Image (cartoon, rainbow, N blue to C red):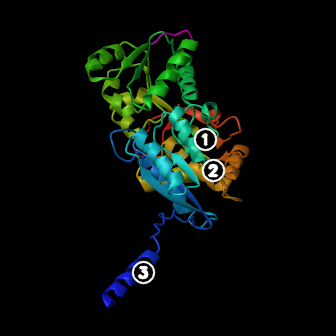
């Protein structure tokens, strides 16, 4: 009887125990008084340019404004040259890390998938490398801090047309994410001028053909990062006009040695030697001391991205309010004075776009 009673009692206890409840992992807590910014950069992988200069620009601003309110909490993520990973990290920043804004400093094909990801994030997303006008492709949350590929093509071809005829123009391109939109913009602008250029793809089998073509051309436009084209560019004849990309790095031009004197590329006139205001000159000096070389325009734009976001976050951290303040405010940055509207999200002032020339490894370029 005792055994029976004990068995019944244990059964009753077992039946009365509550089912265990599994709690979901809590989302990161948003620290009061902080504005969380995630920057997505190419810091590894094979894609160029490397995001190192942009990282230096971001961290320089963060160090200079460590005690401002609201406090900007910067998180830098390496996307390793992958657009797929850029999309994954953009979503992670918005959903899991509870970012208030995102800076994309890696090349991104702003296609329907990318535009959709930005819209779903519902956070201001600032692009520091060239993309087409974001507002056209459902870009209500996307802002372009660099000139558009169309603006860059016009600047280079206006300069070339003022110096020589364009009939023997060559466009050199590879299939990288940075080259494709630039190549399309250059070809479209040349077509508008009734010029049919020679298009050369920078692939290994065409290296000899490229060298032969360059040796007889007067205008050569290189789409995308310059590193791919350094060897071929040395074949250009004396007197040719060589135009590199907005994302040109001074180290790549230095590798051209004697040919460097005829190379030019579009960038901000305000980072060029002898043209900067006091604030911009101080930025160039601070950046050069920190990074060991002068800033590129994308590095200045990365610094400016935090200038814009900090200004827009002054009163409220609500994402919609921040977006509206970006659209309604002119911001004087290092690379340019940015101006956006509800229907125009490419904010670089084209009057500040200039053609630059190489002066030395540790000195800023000059305006041609």
Query: Horizontal placement of 333 versus 213: left or right?
Result: right
64 w.r.t. 319: above or below: below
On residue 287, the disc is: none
Q: What is the secondary structure assignment of the residue under circle 1? A: strand
Whether residue 335 is visible, yes or no, is no
Distance between the alpha carbons at the discs numbered 1 and 2: 11 Å
Residue located at (54% from left, 12% from top)? 191
Q: Are marks 1 and 2 in contact (CB under 8 Å)?
A: yes
Query: Horizontal placement of 105 versus 253: left or right?
Result: right
In the rendering, at what x and y percent does residue 21 appear? Answer: 47, 68
Residue located at (38% from left, 48% from top)? 43
On residue 13, the disc is: 3
Q: Are marks 2 and 3 in contact (CB under 8 Å)?
A: no
Q: Main secondary structure of the magenta part?
A: loop
Residue located at (32% from left, 24% from top)? 232
Asked if the magenta segment contains residue 194, the reply would be yes
Q: Which residue is mark 1?
A: 143
Q: Are marks 1 and 3 in contact (CB under 8 Å)?
A: no
In the rendering, at what x and y percent does residue 199 appear? Answer: 41, 15
């Amino acid at each position: 009887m005792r055994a029976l009673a004990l068995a019944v009692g244990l059964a009753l206890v077992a039946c009365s125990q509550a089912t265990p409840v599994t709690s979901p992992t809590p989302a990161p807590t948003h620290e009061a008084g902080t504005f969380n910014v995630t920057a997505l950069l190419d810091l590894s992988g094979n894609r160029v340019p490397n995001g190192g200069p942009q990282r230096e620009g971001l961290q320089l601003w963060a160090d200079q404004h460590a005690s401002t309110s609201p406090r900007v909490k910067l998180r830098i993520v390496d996307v390793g040259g992958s657009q797929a990973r850029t999309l994954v990290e953009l979503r992670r920043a918005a959903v899991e890390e509870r970012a208030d804004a995102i800076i994309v400093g890696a090349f991104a094909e702003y296609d329907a998938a990318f535009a959709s990801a930005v819209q779903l994030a519902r956070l201001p997303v600032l692009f520091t490398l060239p993309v087409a006008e974001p507002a056209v492709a459902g870009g209500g949350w996307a802002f372009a801090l660099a000139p558009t590929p169309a603006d860059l093509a016009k600047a280079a071809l206006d300069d070339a047309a003022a110096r020589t005829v364009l009939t023997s123009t060559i466009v050199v391109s590879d299939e990288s994410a940075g080259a494709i939109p630039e190549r399309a913009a250059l070809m479209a602008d040349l077509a508008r001028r009734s010029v049919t250029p020679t298009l050369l793809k920078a692939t290994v089998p065409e290296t000899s053909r490229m060298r032969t073509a360059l040796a007889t051309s007067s205008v050569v436009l290189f789409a995308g990062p310059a590193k791919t084209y350094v060897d071929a560019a040395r074949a250009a004849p004396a007197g040719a006009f060589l135009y590199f990309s907005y994302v040109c790095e001074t180290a790549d031009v230095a590798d051209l040695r004697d040919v460097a004197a005829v190379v030019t590329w579009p960038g901000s006139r305000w980072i060029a030697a002898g043209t900067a205001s006091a604030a911009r000159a101080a930025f160039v000096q601070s950046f050069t001391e920190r990074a060991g070389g002068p800033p590129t325009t994308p590095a200045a734009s990365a610094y400016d991205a935090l200038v814009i976001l900090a200004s827009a976050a002054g009163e409220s951290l609500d994402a919609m309010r921040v977006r509206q303040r970006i659209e309604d405010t002119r911001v004087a940055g290092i690379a340019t004075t940015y101006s956006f509207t509800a229907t125009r999200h490419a904010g670089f002032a084209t009057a500040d776009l200039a053609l630059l020339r190489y002066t030395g490894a540790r000195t800023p370029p000059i305006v041609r």
